[in-house]
Amino acid sequence: MKRPLRIGQIVPSSNITMETEIPAMLNAHGAQRFTFHSSRMRMHKVTREELVAMNKEGLRCIAELSDAQVDIASTACLVAHMAMGPGYHRTAQAELEAEARRLGSKAAVMTSSGALIEGLKHLGARRIALMAPYSDALTQAVVKYIEAEGIEVKHFLNFSIENNIAVGERDPMVLLDDLKNLKTAGVDTVVLSVCVQMPSLPAIHEAQKRLGIPVTSTAICTVRGMLDRLGLAAEVPGAGALLGDRIGLEVTAK
């Protein structure tokens, strides 16, 4: 029997979401078996100082995942890269990939921050609205980062939750209530959770149904990036337009 594909993630130590949502989506894919492996970077509070310190642990983490001979390795934090300034995900990916190759690993290497940009471009997004749990300053950094990639952020909501565990414990279905305060007129895509720690997967299908435009998250974009790099179909039931879920889009299709 062909062995399962090994999925590696570089995860902030206080992240409790990516090791839940990524397996949930990949296991729902149905065409392939997967196992899941993580290396962790210390981080408690979502502040720029802790994010800078956390980024320095990436090379150790890619080495640990290389030891497990994973088929793909991805970072599992968006704001840690976007807080460093526009385009930083390319620098981070190049450094991680170089270290993996130095250690003899052939794993595909990616970042969740880069995956969001890729995913939005797959959707043809030009004007988006998003929700984030971050402080005002970090949310503004994320907005500027996305706009530097040629995608306008017309509106955003941020919830100013500094404690990362509290972010991960937020009820994802509350996002459907939050959605009422998000201005979506004139946007073509909504990022229900730009933060990989803020759970959103259970609400994605319903949010897209209500809005009638593509709804995604950084976690969903990460899965899309993984599936593309592994040569697998980008289809996961209930995970929004980026992964083949067309609910709510039929009425707006031309």
Image (cartoon, rainbow, N blue to C red):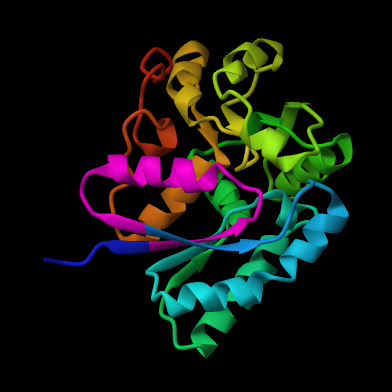
- Residue 147 pos. (x, y %): 74, 44
Q: 29 or 57, which is in the foreground? A: 57
Q: Residue furthest left?
A: 1
In percent of the image, x 79 and y 46: which residue is there? 46
Q: Position of residue 17 (x, y in %)?
A: 55, 42
Magenta residues, start to end: 7-35
Name the quadrant containing residue 140.
top right
Residue 29 shown in magenta: yes
Instruction: Using the rendered view, name the quadrant where residue 244 is placed.
Output: top left
Quadrant where the C terminus sits is top left
* Residue 122 visible in the displayed image: no
Q: Is residue 21 left or right of residue 116?
A: left
- Left or right of residue 158: residue 32: left
Q: Residue at x 59, y 23 (%)?
A: 171
Q: In this picture, is 124 found above or below 108?
A: above
Position of residue 79 relative to residue 175, above or below, is: below
Can residue 140 be seen in the rendering of this structure?
yes
Front position in the image: 246 or 218 = 218
Quadrant of residue 85 within the rendered picture: bottom right
Q: Which residue corresponds to the image point at 62% horizontal and 47% vertical from the top-left? A: 15
Counting from the top left corner in percent of width and height, residue 234 is at 34, 45
The one nearer the camera, 253 or 180, is 180
- Could you tell me residue 185's position as x and y percent? 66, 15
Based on the picture, tell me whether residue 40 belongs to the magenta stretch. Answer: no
Task: Report how many numbered discs are placed on residues in the image.
Answer: 0
| Quarter in which the N terminus is drawn | bottom left
